[in-house]
Image (spheres, rainbow, N blue to C red):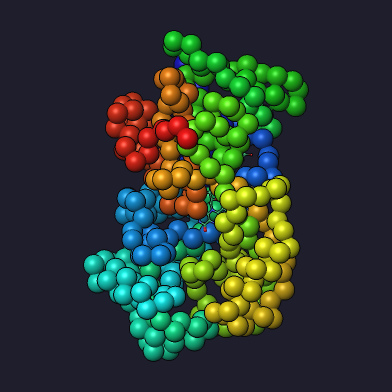
Amino acid sequence: MEHPTVIVGAGMAGVCAALAISKHAPVLLADIPSPEAASMAAVAGLANPIIPRRANLVWRCCEALKALEKLSLELEVPPLHHGLLRPATSWDAMEGYRARAASHPEIARWHGPEASAEAWPWIETPFGTLEVLEGGAFDLQAFVRAGIGRLESRGASIRADWLLTGWRESLDAVEAVFQGPDGPHTFPCSRLILAAGAGFRNFPELARLRLHPLKGQLLVVEVDHPPDGVRPVSGGGYMVPMGNRMVIGSSYEHQFHGAGPRAEVTDELLSRATKSMPWLEAARVVDERAGIRVTVPGTRLPMVGPLPGHRSTWILSGLASRGLLMAPYLAANLSDWIADPNAIPKELHVTLG
Ligand SMILES: Cc1cc2nc3c(=O)[nH]c(=O)nc-3n(C[C@H](O)[C@H](O)[C@H](O)COP(=O)(O)OP(=O)(O)OC[C@H]3O[C@@H](n4cnc5c(N)ncnc54)[C@H](O)[C@@H]3O)c2cc1C
Protein backbone atom coordinates (compact mmCIF):
# COMPACT_ATOMS: atom_id res chain seq x y z
CA MET A 1 0.00 0.00 0.00
CA GLU A 2 1.18 3.53 -0.80
CA HIS A 3 2.53 5.39 2.22
CA PRO A 4 0.76 8.71 2.79
CA THR A 5 2.18 12.13 2.12
CA VAL A 6 2.79 13.50 5.60
CA ILE A 7 2.32 17.22 6.08
CA VAL A 8 3.59 18.82 9.28
CA GLY A 9 1.82 21.99 10.39
CA ALA A 10 -1.92 22.61 10.27
CA GLY A 11 -1.69 26.33 9.56
CA MET A 12 -2.84 27.98 6.35
CA ALA A 13 0.07 26.51 4.34
CA GLY A 14 -0.20 22.92 5.60
CA VAL A 15 -3.99 22.75 5.44
CA CYS A 16 -4.14 24.12 1.88
CA ALA A 17 -1.39 21.70 0.80
CA ALA A 18 -3.17 18.77 2.46
CA LEU A 19 -6.44 19.69 0.74
CA ALA A 20 -4.77 19.75 -2.66
CA ILE A 21 -2.81 16.51 -2.27
CA SER A 22 -5.64 14.58 -0.62
CA LYS A 23 -7.63 14.91 -3.86
CA HIS A 24 -5.50 12.12 -5.36
CA ALA A 25 -3.28 10.57 -2.65
CA PRO A 26 -3.50 9.55 1.00
CA VAL A 27 -2.51 12.30 3.44
CA LEU A 28 -1.63 12.54 7.11
CA LEU A 29 -1.67 16.04 8.59
CA ALA A 30 0.16 16.38 11.91
CA ASP A 31 0.30 19.43 14.16
CA ILE A 32 1.05 20.44 17.70
CA PRO A 33 -0.64 23.56 19.09
CA SER A 34 1.86 26.39 19.53
CA PRO A 35 1.57 29.97 20.82
CA GLU A 36 3.74 30.95 17.83
CA ALA A 37 1.31 29.75 15.13
CA ALA A 38 0.70 32.68 12.76
CA SER A 39 -2.62 31.27 11.52
CA MET A 40 -4.00 31.38 15.06
CA ALA A 41 -3.05 35.03 15.47
CA ALA A 42 -4.53 36.35 12.24
CA VAL A 43 -8.16 36.60 13.41
CA ALA A 44 -9.06 38.50 10.27
CA GLY A 45 -6.60 39.43 7.60
CA LEU A 46 -6.31 41.09 4.24
CA ALA A 47 -5.74 39.50 0.87
CA ASN A 48 -4.21 42.57 -0.73
CA PRO A 49 -2.91 42.19 -4.30
CA ILE A 50 -1.08 45.54 -4.07
CA ILE A 51 2.17 45.99 -2.18
CA PRO A 52 1.68 49.12 -0.07
CA ARG A 53 4.69 51.35 -0.63
CA ARG A 54 5.05 51.74 -4.37
CA ALA A 55 1.77 50.08 -5.24
CA ASN A 56 3.49 47.29 -7.16
CA LEU A 57 1.45 44.17 -7.73
CA VAL A 58 2.10 41.12 -5.57
CA TRP A 59 3.97 38.36 -7.44
CA ARG A 60 1.50 36.30 -9.53
CA CYS A 61 -1.36 38.16 -7.84
CA CYS A 62 -3.98 37.32 -10.47
CA GLU A 63 -3.37 33.57 -10.19
CA ALA A 64 -3.23 33.89 -6.39
CA LEU A 65 -6.54 35.76 -6.27
CA LYS A 66 -8.15 33.09 -8.45
CA ALA A 67 -6.83 30.29 -6.22
CA LEU A 68 -8.11 32.11 -3.11
CA GLU A 69 -11.53 32.62 -4.67
CA LYS A 70 -11.71 28.95 -5.65
CA LEU A 71 -10.79 27.85 -2.13
CA SER A 72 -13.28 30.28 -0.63
CA LEU A 73 -16.06 28.74 -2.75
CA GLU A 74 -14.90 25.17 -2.17
CA LEU A 75 -14.77 25.54 1.62
CA GLU A 76 -17.72 27.91 1.80
CA VAL A 77 -15.69 30.55 3.59
CA PRO A 78 -16.86 33.78 1.94
CA PRO A 79 -14.88 37.02 2.24
CA LEU A 80 -15.74 39.21 5.22
CA HIS A 81 -15.43 42.11 2.78
CA HIS A 82 -14.69 42.32 -0.90
CA GLY A 83 -11.99 44.87 -1.80
CA LEU A 84 -10.23 47.34 0.48
CA LEU A 85 -8.99 50.91 0.73
CA ARG A 86 -5.39 51.99 0.59
CA PRO A 87 -5.05 55.67 1.58
CA ALA A 88 -1.94 57.39 0.19
CA THR A 89 0.35 58.71 2.89
CA SER A 90 2.37 61.24 0.83
CA TRP A 91 2.41 63.09 -2.50
CA ASP A 92 4.92 60.53 -3.80
CA ALA A 93 2.66 57.64 -2.89
CA MET A 94 -0.23 59.46 -4.54
CA GLU A 95 1.61 59.52 -7.88
CA GLY A 96 2.43 55.82 -7.65
CA TYR A 97 -1.12 54.89 -6.74
CA ARG A 98 -2.60 56.99 -9.51
CA ALA A 99 -0.27 55.29 -12.00
CA ARG A 100 -1.22 51.83 -10.72
CA ALA A 101 -4.93 52.59 -11.10
CA ALA A 102 -4.29 53.75 -14.68
CA SER A 103 -2.25 50.64 -15.59
CA HIS A 104 -4.55 48.13 -13.84
CA PRO A 105 -8.09 49.53 -13.81
CA GLU A 106 -9.44 46.00 -13.25
CA ILE A 107 -7.62 45.87 -9.89
CA ALA A 108 -7.61 49.42 -8.54
CA ARG A 109 -9.33 52.78 -8.89
CA TRP A 110 -7.88 56.13 -7.82
CA HIS A 111 -9.88 58.70 -5.79
CA GLY A 112 -8.33 62.14 -5.21
CA PRO A 113 -8.49 63.82 -1.77
CA GLU A 114 -11.90 65.46 -2.27
CA ALA A 115 -13.62 62.46 -3.83
CA SER A 116 -12.10 60.30 -1.16
CA ALA A 117 -13.30 62.50 1.73
CA GLU A 118 -16.78 62.47 0.26
CA ALA A 119 -16.92 58.69 -0.29
CA TRP A 120 -15.31 57.66 3.03
CA PRO A 121 -15.76 60.45 5.60
CA TRP A 122 -14.83 58.04 8.43
CA ILE A 123 -11.16 58.06 7.48
CA GLU A 124 -8.74 60.94 6.94
CA THR A 125 -7.23 60.67 3.48
CA PRO A 126 -5.46 63.99 2.74
CA PHE A 127 -3.53 62.49 -0.19
CA GLY A 128 -6.39 60.49 -1.69
CA THR A 129 -7.14 56.78 -1.75
CA LEU A 130 -6.48 53.80 -3.92
CA GLU A 131 -9.60 51.66 -3.90
CA VAL A 132 -8.47 48.06 -4.38
CA LEU A 133 -11.27 46.26 -6.19
CA GLU A 134 -9.92 42.72 -5.87
CA GLY A 135 -9.05 40.69 -2.78
CA GLY A 136 -10.49 41.84 0.53
CA ALA A 137 -10.72 40.65 4.11
CA PHE A 138 -11.08 37.04 5.25
CA ASP A 139 -11.31 35.09 8.47
CA LEU A 140 -8.06 33.15 8.12
CA GLN A 141 -8.88 30.78 10.96
CA ALA A 142 -12.20 29.92 9.32
CA PHE A 143 -10.22 28.64 6.32
CA VAL A 144 -8.06 26.48 8.57
CA ARG A 145 -11.08 25.08 10.45
CA ALA A 146 -13.10 24.44 7.31
CA GLY A 147 -10.07 22.89 5.60
CA ILE A 148 -9.52 20.47 8.46
CA GLY A 149 -13.23 19.58 8.43
CA ARG A 150 -13.04 18.89 4.67
CA LEU A 151 -9.93 16.74 5.12
CA GLU A 152 -11.67 14.69 7.82
CA SER A 153 -14.70 14.13 5.60
CA ARG A 154 -12.35 12.99 2.81
CA GLY A 155 -10.83 10.40 5.13
CA ALA A 156 -7.43 12.06 5.59
CA SER A 157 -5.69 11.24 8.87
CA ILE A 158 -5.33 14.19 11.23
CA ARG A 159 -3.16 14.18 14.34
CA ALA A 160 -3.73 17.39 16.27
CA ASP A 161 -1.21 16.53 19.01
CA TRP A 162 1.82 15.09 17.25
CA LEU A 163 5.07 16.99 17.57
CA LEU A 164 7.56 16.31 14.77
CA THR A 165 10.92 15.65 16.40
CA GLY A 166 12.93 14.53 13.36
CA TRP A 167 13.04 12.59 10.09
CA ARG A 168 15.26 10.19 8.16
CA GLU A 169 15.36 10.02 4.40
CA SER A 170 16.80 7.01 2.56
CA LEU A 171 17.01 6.40 -1.18
CA ASP A 172 13.30 5.75 -1.72
CA ALA A 173 11.53 6.54 1.54
CA VAL A 174 11.23 8.99 4.41
CA GLU A 175 10.39 8.27 8.01
CA ALA A 176 9.00 11.05 10.17
CA VAL A 177 9.47 10.80 13.93
CA PHE A 178 6.74 12.25 16.13
CA GLN A 179 6.12 12.55 19.82
CA GLY A 180 2.42 11.92 20.49
CA PRO A 181 0.57 11.98 23.83
CA ASP A 182 0.94 8.19 23.96
CA GLY A 183 4.68 8.15 23.14
CA PRO A 184 6.91 8.32 20.06
CA HIS A 185 5.78 7.29 16.57
CA THR A 186 7.97 6.56 13.59
CA PHE A 187 5.88 7.05 10.52
CA PRO A 188 6.85 5.98 6.99
CA CYS A 189 5.83 8.51 4.35
CA SER A 190 6.04 8.68 0.58
CA ARG A 191 6.86 12.38 1.00
CA LEU A 192 7.26 14.66 4.01
CA ILE A 193 6.19 18.28 3.64
CA LEU A 194 7.36 20.61 6.39
CA ALA A 195 4.88 23.48 6.74
CA ALA A 196 5.70 24.12 10.38
CA GLY A 197 5.85 27.93 10.25
CA ALA A 198 8.18 29.31 12.93
CA GLY A 199 8.80 25.72 14.09
CA PHE A 200 11.61 25.61 11.49
CA ARG A 201 13.91 27.06 14.17
CA ASN A 202 13.84 23.78 16.11
CA PHE A 203 15.59 21.79 13.37
CA PRO A 204 19.22 22.60 12.48
CA GLU A 205 18.63 21.44 8.90
CA LEU A 206 15.83 24.01 8.48
CA ALA A 207 17.49 26.74 10.56
CA ARG A 208 20.25 26.98 7.90
CA LEU A 209 17.71 27.88 5.21
CA ARG A 210 17.14 31.51 4.28
CA LEU A 211 14.13 31.84 6.59
CA HIS A 212 13.56 34.62 9.09
CA PRO A 213 11.03 34.77 11.96
CA LEU A 214 9.03 37.99 12.19
CA LYS A 215 6.66 38.47 15.09
CA GLY A 216 3.32 40.14 14.46
CA GLN A 217 0.67 41.37 16.86
CA LEU A 218 -2.88 42.55 16.34
CA LEU A 219 -5.77 43.59 18.52
CA VAL A 220 -9.53 43.42 18.41
CA VAL A 221 -11.48 46.44 19.62
CA GLU A 222 -15.16 47.05 20.16
CA VAL A 223 -16.84 50.32 19.23
CA ASP A 224 -20.46 50.96 20.29
CA HIS A 225 -21.48 52.96 17.23
CA PRO A 226 -18.99 52.54 14.38
CA PRO A 227 -19.56 54.93 11.47
CA ASP A 228 -21.66 53.63 8.56
CA GLY A 229 -19.91 52.11 5.61
CA VAL A 230 -16.60 51.26 7.31
CA ARG A 231 -14.44 49.08 5.04
CA PRO A 232 -11.12 47.29 5.39
CA VAL A 233 -8.12 49.58 5.23
CA SER A 234 -4.50 48.82 4.48
CA GLY A 235 -2.02 51.54 5.27
CA GLY A 236 0.21 52.14 8.27
CA GLY A 237 -1.09 48.74 9.41
CA TYR A 238 -4.53 47.43 8.62
CA MET A 239 -8.07 47.47 9.91
CA VAL A 240 -10.86 44.98 9.25
CA PRO A 241 -14.38 45.74 10.50
CA MET A 242 -16.44 42.81 11.80
CA GLY A 243 -19.75 44.33 12.95
CA ASN A 244 -19.01 46.56 15.92
CA ARG A 245 -15.59 44.92 16.32
CA MET A 246 -12.51 46.01 14.42
CA VAL A 247 -9.36 43.97 13.96
CA ILE A 248 -6.33 46.26 13.97
CA GLY A 249 -2.98 44.92 12.85
CA SER A 250 -0.20 44.49 12.81
CA SER A 251 3.31 44.91 14.15
CA TYR A 252 6.54 43.75 12.47
CA GLU A 253 9.04 42.76 15.16
CA HIS A 254 12.39 41.41 13.99
CA GLN A 255 13.80 41.19 17.54
CA PHE A 256 11.54 39.70 20.16
CA HIS A 257 11.47 37.68 23.35
CA GLY A 258 8.48 35.40 23.64
CA ALA A 259 5.55 34.89 21.29
CA GLY A 260 2.83 36.55 23.41
CA PRO A 261 1.19 39.97 22.85
CA ARG A 262 2.64 43.03 24.60
CA ALA A 263 0.70 46.00 25.99
CA GLU A 264 3.10 48.58 24.45
CA VAL A 265 2.51 47.15 20.99
CA THR A 266 -1.26 47.22 21.48
CA ASP A 267 -1.07 50.91 22.49
CA GLU A 268 1.11 51.70 19.49
CA LEU A 269 -1.19 49.93 17.00
CA LEU A 270 -4.29 51.61 18.41
CA SER A 271 -2.73 55.05 18.47
CA ARG A 272 -1.52 54.65 14.86
CA ALA A 273 -5.00 53.63 13.69
CA THR A 274 -6.66 56.44 15.68
CA LYS A 275 -4.59 59.04 13.82
CA SER A 276 -6.51 58.45 10.60
CA MET A 277 -9.74 57.19 12.22
CA PRO A 278 -10.30 59.41 15.30
CA TRP A 279 -13.58 57.63 16.15
CA LEU A 280 -11.42 54.72 17.34
CA GLU A 281 -10.64 56.80 20.45
CA ALA A 282 -13.85 55.37 21.92
CA ALA A 283 -12.70 51.79 21.23
CA ARG A 284 -12.32 49.16 23.96
CA VAL A 285 -9.65 46.50 23.47
CA VAL A 286 -11.28 43.06 23.76
CA ASP A 287 -8.52 40.78 22.45
CA GLU A 288 -4.82 40.83 21.58
CA ARG A 289 -3.02 38.16 19.58
CA ALA A 290 0.51 37.59 18.43
CA GLY A 291 2.18 34.99 16.24
CA ILE A 292 5.37 34.46 14.29
CA ARG A 293 5.36 34.71 10.52
CA VAL A 294 8.23 33.39 8.44
CA THR A 295 9.78 35.53 5.72
CA VAL A 296 12.44 34.88 3.10
CA PRO A 297 14.83 37.87 3.15
CA GLY A 298 15.73 38.99 -0.33
CA THR A 299 12.77 37.58 -2.24
CA ARG A 300 10.00 38.21 0.30
CA LEU A 301 8.29 35.32 -1.41
CA PRO A 302 7.55 31.81 -0.12
CA MET A 303 10.10 29.00 -0.25
CA VAL A 304 9.00 25.65 -1.69
CA GLY A 305 10.84 22.50 -2.71
CA PRO A 306 12.97 19.58 -1.59
CA LEU A 307 15.52 20.29 1.12
CA PRO A 308 19.11 20.48 -0.19
CA GLY A 309 20.39 16.93 -0.66
CA HIS A 310 16.90 15.41 -0.31
CA ARG A 311 14.28 14.23 -2.76
CA SER A 312 11.26 13.49 -0.64
CA THR A 313 11.55 15.92 2.29
CA TRP A 314 10.11 19.29 1.28
CA ILE A 315 9.84 22.70 2.88
CA LEU A 316 6.74 24.85 2.37
CA SER A 317 7.30 28.12 4.20
CA GLY A 318 7.93 31.85 4.00
CA LEU A 319 4.33 32.93 3.49
CA ALA A 320 5.10 36.06 5.54
CA SER A 321 2.14 38.46 5.67
CA ARG A 322 0.51 36.91 2.64
CA GLY A 323 -0.77 33.56 3.84
CA LEU A 324 -4.20 34.29 2.39
CA LEU A 325 -2.91 35.02 -1.08
CA MET A 326 0.00 32.60 -1.20
CA ALA A 327 -1.21 29.40 0.53
CA PRO A 328 -4.05 28.63 -1.94
CA TYR A 329 -1.80 29.49 -4.91
CA LEU A 330 1.08 27.29 -3.71
CA ALA A 331 -1.31 24.44 -2.93
CA ALA A 332 -2.92 24.66 -6.35
CA ASN A 333 0.49 24.10 -7.96
CA LEU A 334 2.06 21.74 -5.45
CA SER A 335 1.14 18.44 -7.12
CA ASP A 336 2.64 19.61 -10.44
CA TRP A 337 5.80 20.78 -8.68
CA ILE A 338 6.10 17.47 -6.82
CA ALA A 339 5.81 15.61 -10.14
CA ASP A 340 8.44 17.88 -11.68
CA PRO A 341 10.49 19.93 -9.19
CA ASN A 342 12.12 21.73 -12.16
CA ALA A 343 8.77 23.44 -12.68
CA ILE A 344 9.01 25.27 -9.33
CA PRO A 345 9.40 28.98 -10.17
CA LYS A 346 12.96 30.13 -9.47
CA GLU A 347 11.67 32.90 -7.19
CA LEU A 348 10.51 30.20 -4.75
CA HIS A 349 13.64 28.04 -4.78
CA VAL A 350 15.01 26.67 -1.53
CA THR A 351 18.11 28.66 -0.56
CA LEU A 352 20.50 28.61 2.35
CA GLY A 353 20.70 31.62 4.65
C1 LIG B 1 -0.59 39.42 13.66
C2 LIG B 1 -0.60 38.78 12.31
C3 LIG B 1 -1.37 39.35 11.30
C4 LIG B 1 -1.40 38.77 10.03
N1 LIG B 1 -2.18 39.34 9.07
C5 LIG B 1 -2.26 38.76 7.85
C6 LIG B 1 -3.09 39.31 6.83
O1 LIG B 1 -3.71 40.36 7.00
N2 LIG B 1 -3.15 38.67 5.64
C7 LIG B 1 -2.43 37.53 5.40
O2 LIG B 1 -2.53 36.96 4.30
N3 LIG B 1 -1.63 37.00 6.33
C8 LIG B 1 -1.51 37.60 7.54
N4 LIG B 1 -0.68 37.08 8.47
C9 LIG B 1 0.24 36.01 8.09
C10 LIG B 1 -0.41 34.65 8.08
O3 LIG B 1 -0.95 34.40 9.35
C11 LIG B 1 0.68 33.63 7.69
O4 LIG B 1 1.17 33.91 6.40
C12 LIG B 1 0.15 32.22 7.66
O5 LIG B 1 -0.64 31.97 8.77
C13 LIG B 1 1.32 31.26 7.63
O6 LIG B 1 0.83 29.97 7.71
P1 LIG B 1 1.78 28.74 7.93
O7 LIG B 1 0.91 27.55 7.80
O8 LIG B 1 2.98 28.86 7.06
O9 LIG B 1 2.34 28.87 9.42
P2 LIG B 1 1.58 28.77 10.82
O10 LIG B 1 0.24 29.35 10.75
O11 LIG B 1 2.51 29.33 11.83
O12 LIG B 1 1.39 27.21 11.04
C14 LIG B 1 2.44 26.34 11.38
C15 LIG B 1 1.87 25.20 12.21
O13 LIG B 1 2.89 24.23 12.43
C16 LIG B 1 2.83 23.78 13.77
N5 LIG B 1 4.14 23.25 14.14
C17 LIG B 1 5.30 23.92 14.31
N6 LIG B 1 6.30 23.07 14.64
C18 LIG B 1 5.76 21.82 14.67
C19 LIG B 1 6.28 20.52 14.93
N7 LIG B 1 7.57 20.30 15.22
N8 LIG B 1 5.43 19.45 14.88
C20 LIG B 1 4.12 19.62 14.58
N9 LIG B 1 3.58 20.84 14.30
C21 LIG B 1 4.38 21.92 14.34
C22 LIG B 1 2.46 25.07 14.53
O14 LIG B 1 1.95 24.82 15.81
C23 LIG B 1 1.41 25.66 13.59
O15 LIG B 1 0.13 25.15 13.87
C24 LIG B 1 -0.62 37.62 9.76
C25 LIG B 1 0.15 37.05 10.76
C26 LIG B 1 0.17 37.62 12.02
C27 LIG B 1 1.02 37.00 13.09
| Image vertical order of residue 128 relative to residue 100, above or below | below
The reply to whether residue 279 is in sight is: yes
In the image, taking residue 173 as reference, residue 278 lies left or right, namely right
In the image as oriented, which residue stretches furthest toward the top?
Answer: 171
Residue found at x 64% / y 74%: 271
Residue found at x 50% / y 25%: 192
Residue found at x 47% / y 19%: 190
Residue 166 found in image quarter:
top right
Which one is nearer the viewer's eye here, 219 or 231? 219
The reply to whether residue 156 is in sight is: no
Location of residue 205 in the rendering, given as x and y in whole percent from the top left corner: 54, 26
In the image as oriented, which residue stretches furthest toward the left?
Answer: 103
| Image vertical order of residue 271 relative to residue 144, above or below | below
In the image, taking residue 204 as reference, residue 1 lies left or right, namely left
Location of residue 40 in the rendering, given as x and y in whole percent from the top left corner: 63, 49
Which one is nearer the viewer's eye here, 190 or 22? 190
| Image vertical order of residue 123 relative to residue 25, above or below | below
Give the total of numbered labels.
0
Residue found at x 27% / y 71%: 99
Location of residue 155 in the rendering, given as x and y in whole percent from the top left corner: 54, 30
In the image, taking residue 233 as reference, residue 114 lies left or right, namely left
Location of residue 147 in the rendering, given as x and y in whole percent from the top left corner: 53, 43
